[in-house]
Amino acid sequence: MLVTWRYRQRNSLVQSFDPRAWIIFFGCFLASTLFFWDLRYLSFFFVIALTAVFTSGVTWKESRRAWLFILTFVTFFSILTFLTGRGGMELYTTEHIITQVSAPFKIFGWQPTLWVTAERIMFSISMFARVFSIASMTILIPYSLNPSLYGVTFRRLGMPDKIAYGMDLTMRFIPTFGRDFSLTMDAQRARGYEIEKISGGLFAQVRKLAPLVVPVTIHAIVGSEDIIDAMDLRAFGVGPRTWIQQLTFRRRDIALIAFGVAMLLVSAALSLFTYRLWVPDFLLAMAGG
Amino acid sequence: MDIEPVIIENLSFRYRSRAEPAIQNINLRVSAGQLVLIAGASGCGKTTLARCINGLIPRSYKGEVQGRILLQGQDTAALSLARISQLVGTVLQDPERQILGTRVANEVAFGLENLGLPRQEILQRVEQALDYLGISHLRDRETFNLSGGEKQKIALAGVLAMQPRILLLDEPLASLDPASAQEALALARRLADEGMTILMIEHRVEDVLSIQPDRALFMNKGQIEYDGPAEGLEKHVDYRQVKLPARLIMKMASRQPPPPRLEVLPGGKAKPENAAAPLVKFEDASFWYEPERPALEGVTLEIQRGDIIAVLGPNGAGKTTLVKHAIGLLKPKRGRVLVEGRDTRDLSVAQIAHTLGYVFQSPSHMLFAPTVYDELAFGPTNLGQKPQEMEQATREAIQIVNLEGLEKYPPLAMSFGQQKRVSIAAVLAMRSRILAMDEPTAGQDYQNYISFMEAILQMPGFEAILFITHDVDLAVAYSNRVLLVNQGRLVCDGSPYEVLKDQERLTSNRLVPTSLLRANLDFYPRTGRFMKAEELAHAVL
């Protein structure tokens, strides 16, 4: 099946907290990480992320695809920045060259040269640590937070009833939407449609997706009429609603939120002094100064 | 005397977008504890009447209303939808679209949460509703993974939890297998016996008659044509419009001229050189998503020219998995499936489509093109047909399904029946030799279902037809071979008589013998084959 629930009860560290506490902590973690480019500080967040991952109970087997995607993505961009030196210019003004590798050929008189500098090395490592920390904390959410608690979690975080219930409704209809998509895919394949053979320019490719996109969209629109009727018929939106799921903050939740907020404040304060790249002395020494 | 729970006086309604009224001058008084069947063909106004009663009209569907509706003595015009929803509970046709919670308990609690009741009271009422329907064990399950019958019960529990006095059921049997349909009907009877007023909209009249409704209405062109005891329905309705018990149809049809004999599957009679070779062959084919739960297990069968095969079995039995193997959408993990002698593992779905065309249950899952012509040209283009050949195939397909003159019409703006015909034509245009259909009659009323099936059976071009269905009568009336599938296994394969004669086998596979099956079994020594009721009437009476 295209869409399956990733969530299950795992007795993990993440799941030992109230979902609201974890969402708040996650927000603080995200913002705090973005304050830094200094690997010494980023290591702190990297360790938190790794701790959350290793205690999450999420197995490699069930999350392999997500991890491979993230790792490929992060590694690719880290290498790309290392090779081109782009992206880090705001963080350093001078570069210390460790070595240079020149290609043994010329293209129209230009000889491709890779400048290995202390700054570029540190920039790509820092980027890896930063993006990997954020991505791995994000991956854990669908595996760890109970989808039937999304609505009440956001309601208790202060969102209005209707918007919070929208969260629940999205969770409810993602599998239905996935099933409709698979059905349409099968129906069109049975008519000889082969998505893997789509070619042409971008516009032509998008046009050739119409046999999938049109039926799925139309089906969703037609289906939504029934959904709206069903909600109206059971008095949705007539007044403040009760939520049967109860969330209660315990001490550990308060502690997690306090830790998160403190981390954010300290990070904000520190970032006033350290929003720049850190290059260790030994790399500078290798560059000869 | 108690107030009648439903009083409708001179009710008419016209949708804003239409010139003609959808219902006209409806007058109806229903007493407490009555179970009322509302029957009629598609477009007769049944659903509009239901929307007027449950308040969706005029609140969600705008238009011009005349007359008034009193529920428990209160004029609905003055009530909010929230208030109406506590007086009348509605279960819609497709439970999949009305279940809003990810978990069963949340779904049942939904309406009560919206009313802002105290949490303890909600939990208590949820337990009561689940307990009443005998489904407490589903309490913590995810709603998406439930079966059709379970979903229907959950939807009903969600409505009952709001403690309405009136229940409105809109085609509750549409998506259920025979055994689940019977359970749902028995439940409706029990609720009515305990004092609930029930309005049940359904065109499977025969099934509803089995629970002795206290009263039946027959609607036609927006008006009530008959309102009286269920037994009187037969004198006032055309047996071709709603599905009556077979014996009754036979009695009525025997007074009419015999139905024309169908020229069934003309394409299956031609004998090409290799006529003896099977079109499709399963050799011990097995498939599984998880090894411990096989979706298909050791299936061996052949599809021959001239076969009209009904694939029967309960929900989740593996019927669709079986057909998906024939078309190559799934490949067996053990054993082989051969299409015209070639292993499906070596063929793409597109290549197999030359032999086997598959029409999915809902046409809206496949229609996308701006015109009927483009829609039909899609398959042949993908299969690499030459433009001239494609042009001809498309024209022929349009002719066969009677859509001439609508070539430039957008399929998405057509009626359901027309869309269904476009989807069949799309397979015809690919010149596939076998037509495979998933629930071909779903969503169609009785009259359309009969004319649709008969039109397909008489179409030239197909050498074999295969359809997946819940409807035992469809197999009885139109197939010459039945495959009974359950738990991924082919339980039985033979003529309709051989497969369906054994009551025990039917029960263990969640099938329920219908009056048409019984009549055919009774007369089998004289007829030697199964047939539809009209034909049977002239063969034996």
Image (cartoon, coloured by chain):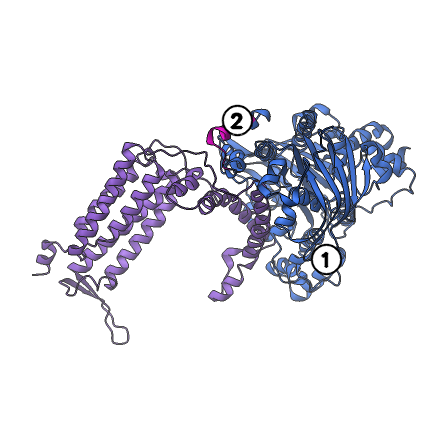
Chain colours: A purple, B blue
The residue range painted magenta reads B116-128
Rendering quarter of residue A118: bottom left
Residue A121: % across, % down:
19, 57
Same chain for labels 1 and 2? Say yes or no.
yes
- Single out the mark in the foreground, 1 or 2: 2
Dot 1: what SS? helix
Looking at this view, name the residue that lies furthest to the top. Answer: B504
Residue ID for mark 1: B397
Q: Amino acid at mark 1?
A: Ala
Residue ID for mark 2: B127
Is residue B122 shown in magenta? Answer: yes
Question: Are the residues tagged 1 and 2 within 8 Å (C-beta)?
Answer: no
Q: Residues within 10 Å of mark 1 (few under 14, many from 20)?
A: many
At 28% from the left edge and 51% from the top edge, which residue is drawn?
Answer: A131
Residue A226: % across, % down:
60, 46
Rendering quarter of residue B37: top right
Chain of the residue under the numbered disc 2 shown in the image: B
Quadrant of the image containing the N terminus of chain B: top right
Q: Nearer the viewer, residue B117 or B511?
A: B117
Quadrant of the image containing the C terminus of chain B: top right
Please state if B13 lies on the left or on the right of A280 as rendered. Answer: right
At 85% from the left edge and 28% from the top edge, which residue is drawn?
Answer: B525
Q: Amino acid at mark 2?
A: Glu
Disc 1 from disc 2: Cα separation: 55 Å
Any part of residue B532 in sight: no
Is residue A91 shown in magenta? Answer: no
Q: Is residue B230 above or below residue A66?
A: above
Q: Nearer the viewer, residue A230 or B425?
A: A230
Q: Which mark, by number, is residue B29? A: none
Looking at this view, name the residue that lies furthest to the bottom. Answer: A109
